[in-house]
Image (cartoon, rainbow, N blue to C red):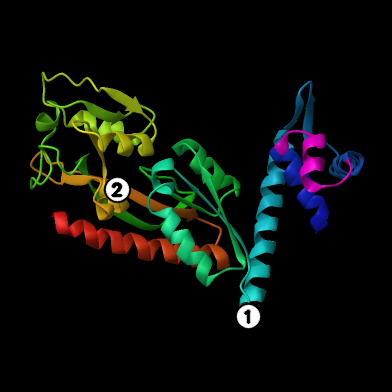
Amino acid sequence: MLHHRLLAYLDEVARSGSIRRAATRLNVASSAVNRQILSLEEEMGMPLFERLPRGLRLTAAGEVLVRHVRDTLNDHQRMLAQVASLKGLTRGEVTIATMASIAGSVLPGVIGAFRESNPRIVVKVSILSIDRIVAALLSGEADLALAYKLPADPRLRCIAEFEHRLGAVMAPDHPLSGRYQVRMADCLEYPLVVADHSMTLRGVLEVLVPEGASFTPAVETNSIELMKRLAQTPPHVTFVNLLDVGDEIRRGVLAFTPLSDDRAITQRASLVQRARAPLDGPAHLLATRIEAEFERQSTVDCVFE
């Protein structure tokens, strides 16, 4: 078995694309890292990195080895977590890849409660696009992924799915506030603050625009936070799911009116792991906490059914 330190060196060089940057992050001398990589390439009988003018890039052989290295490092972390849990001192770290809207809504409360129960576990949160979320999970850079509209992939296993009602969001004194439900046609009379085309939400909304109607947002953005802030100023209207505005509704600064076109309009969030990599102790504990919170939020959604 390759030495653990060498595994860490190889993994960091692959992530950094540079011997110097990897050495800085590892807090060791560049010469030590370079010596280990050269020794490993000699042992393998082929180059693991292409030497480019601006850094290093994995060769095909390097990609195969790095996948093995990351699986080995993850297995090592799982082993340490399992041993620690037997002592009643669960520790370690867990990385979750997610999108900005979820990171700004449900995750702060989940992570806060999780850290109170598990102070020895470090939680890392990466905000990424959908394709990068999947890539991070498959490469082993993330233990869990939580996002809307994740693509089906046999290399991924869905732990849980949750549907949340989409609605029009506005100030409490807005004319649309307090209705049982609204249609997109009702909202077109007001200045709209809408998700831009980089967000999965945009496609859902465009389907709801009546044929022949003009859909001309006043503001387009990929920031859920900006959408919520502008919606607090009448007569702006934005569109998010109930999960995104739970705190603002409780504080009385926003109102939520469900969208409908003769059916409930929802977004589906998925909590996912790699199919062939069982969760270690910290990741399992966080997944359980997320699942419980989303189930609770789904119960709140039922009020609007």
Q: In which quarter of the image is the C terminus?
A: bottom left
Identify the amino acid type marked 2: Val
Q: Which of 65 and 128 is in front in this view?
A: 128
Q: How many marks?
A: 2
Left or right of 104 in this view: 14: right
Amino acid, disc 1 = Leu
- Answer with left or right where residue 107 lies relative to residue 137: left
Can residue 279 be seen here? The reply is no
Q: Which residue is drawn at 16% across and 59% down?
A: 303
Can see residue 129?
yes
Of circles 1 and 2, the one toward us is: 2
Residue 260 against residue 251 in the figure, above or below? above
Pointer 1 residue: 86
**Prevalent SS, magenta region:** helix
Tell me the magenta residue range: 16-29
Image quadrant assignment for residue 130 = top left
Badge 2: few (under 14), some or many (20 or more) residues near its Cα, within 10 Å?
many
Which residue is found at the position 77% from the left and 27% from the top?
Answer: 55
- List the residue tagged with mark 2: 245
Q: What element carries label 2?
A: helix
Point out the image quarter for the N terminus: bottom right
* Rendering coords of residue 24 (x, y %): 80, 41
What residue appears at the point 22 percent right and 19 percent down from the top-left corner? 216
Residue 267 image position (x, y, % from top left)? 28, 45
Q: In this view, does 297 lie to the left or right of 75?
A: left
Left or right of 176, for residue 77? right
Element type at mark 1: helix
